[in-house]
Image (cartoon, grey):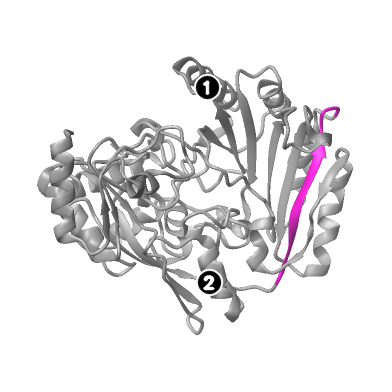
Amino acid sequence: MSEYAHEDLVRELSEHVRGEVHAPCTNGWEEGRSGMQQGAPHRPGAVVVAAGAEDVRAAVAVASRRRVPITAQRTGHGQGAGIDGGILVHTRSMDRVRVDPERRAAWVGAGALWSDVIGAGAPHGLVPLAGSAPGVGAVSYTLGGGVGLLARRHGFAADHVRRVDLVTPDGTARTATAEHEPELFWAVRGAGASLGIVTGMEIGLFAHGDLYGGSLVLDTTEAPAALDAWLRWTGTVPEELTSGVSQLVYPDVEGVPEAWRGRRILQISAAWCGPLDEGPAWIEPLRRIAPVLSDTFAVRPWTDAGAVFDEHTDPAAFDGRSVLVDTVPEGAAEALAGLTGPSAPCMSVVSVRHLGGALARPPRMPSAVGHRGASYAFTVLTFPAGGGAGARKAARGLRERAAALFDGHGSGRSTTLAFGTHTPDEVGEAFAPDDRQRLIRLSRELDPYRLWHSHRPLR
């Protein structure tokens, strides 16, 4: 897109939206296009900071008239290949959250973070099915499925969505519920980021007191079977306990605690939502797996839930590959540790989430969320050194070799627990075959000119 075309696009958008419109290479454009993922930044012809749903509709209408691509983001955690030209709608100004304590429900604007939703529910003793990172956008997380701190007790976050307002790529503002536009309601809960720009949603909330949770950081340099020990432990726990692990070799650099440098670290994070006095007994066996370098388990209010997993928040360039696993083949965990150890071509992090429990049960209202029978989600994140083509190719090879360890034991992939760009065939592996075809048909109906830019393309 030429400089003149950019100027013309910015001019037309400015005539139709109330929010800010930023041209390329301005401060507002740089801020709007940036996010957590730095590997393939957006380079839009214009950034629209939407003031509300009408701005989103107007921006989509402009894209439709001009036949230019359009996409949206809040934090950029799940971003893949950036948009080149066209319109990027930033939703940060649409962050309102309204709680209805009698109905145990919350209306969540497109730009709200989980911290906003948690904070709004706290005075009423109500909590959402938030993720482990409170700085992630609540809408995109939820509509991709959502495996949060209460997942094994209450299921996918998408299962508890009651209403979705969105603007589809054909420029139509729609409201989808179980009774109104049921096909779209089914689809958007599981494939939301691929079907348009959501302007808000209503979700169910849950009455929960404090939780018992935190992380153990273990030195597993001399304990190669540590991940296997955690996997065995997960087979003993009730669904009130949701947990995950991260495994990596910490670099020997300034800023890393000296006791961690050059060591293979396993961080085990868990949230217990049952009777508080029963929580510590379930965690105690984990402290015997390997030497404990840090222990943050404590009774916490939900407003401190982000400290459970204590996830990385600094922007970085990374990609990820996930595989949903029904059973873990013997030796796979130890082989995975070897692949991602000191001899790996780039820094990598292995993350595993324990699934099952309520996640495996069918929801009251069917949705597009797939592979509910999986027991674990394995993800390998890679951080290519230097970011060149050779480094990216080596990192991609590492991710694929890691995924191959589970051949014959996997049920598909999760796009919400992986990062970077996905091909339509890769996205398709996240859904049952019939559901994928159903989603493709709906996508063709809503976006006949393929204007919607998504890192999870359905076709």
Horizontal placement of 69 versus 100: left or right? left
Query: Marks 1 and 2: which is nearer the front?
Result: 1
- The amino acid type found where label 2 is placed reads Leu
Horizontal placement of 2 versus 121: left or right? left
The reply to whether residue 158 is in sight is yes
Secondary structure state at the residue bearing disc 2: loop
Residue 184: percent from left, percent from top: 29, 57
Q: Residues within 10 Å of mark 2 (few under 14, many from 20)?
A: many
Q: Residues within 10 Å of mark 1 (few under 14, many from 20)?
A: few
- The amino acid type found where label 1 is placed reads Gly
Residue 384: percent from left, percent from top: 54, 24
Tell me which secondary structure the magenta stretch mostly adopts. strand
Residue 371 shown in magenta: no
Query: What residue sits right under mark 2 in the picture?
Result: 205
- Residue found at x 55% / y 25%: 399
Residue 218 shown in magenta: yes
Q: Which mark is residue 128?
A: none
What segment is highlighted magenta in the picture? 210-222
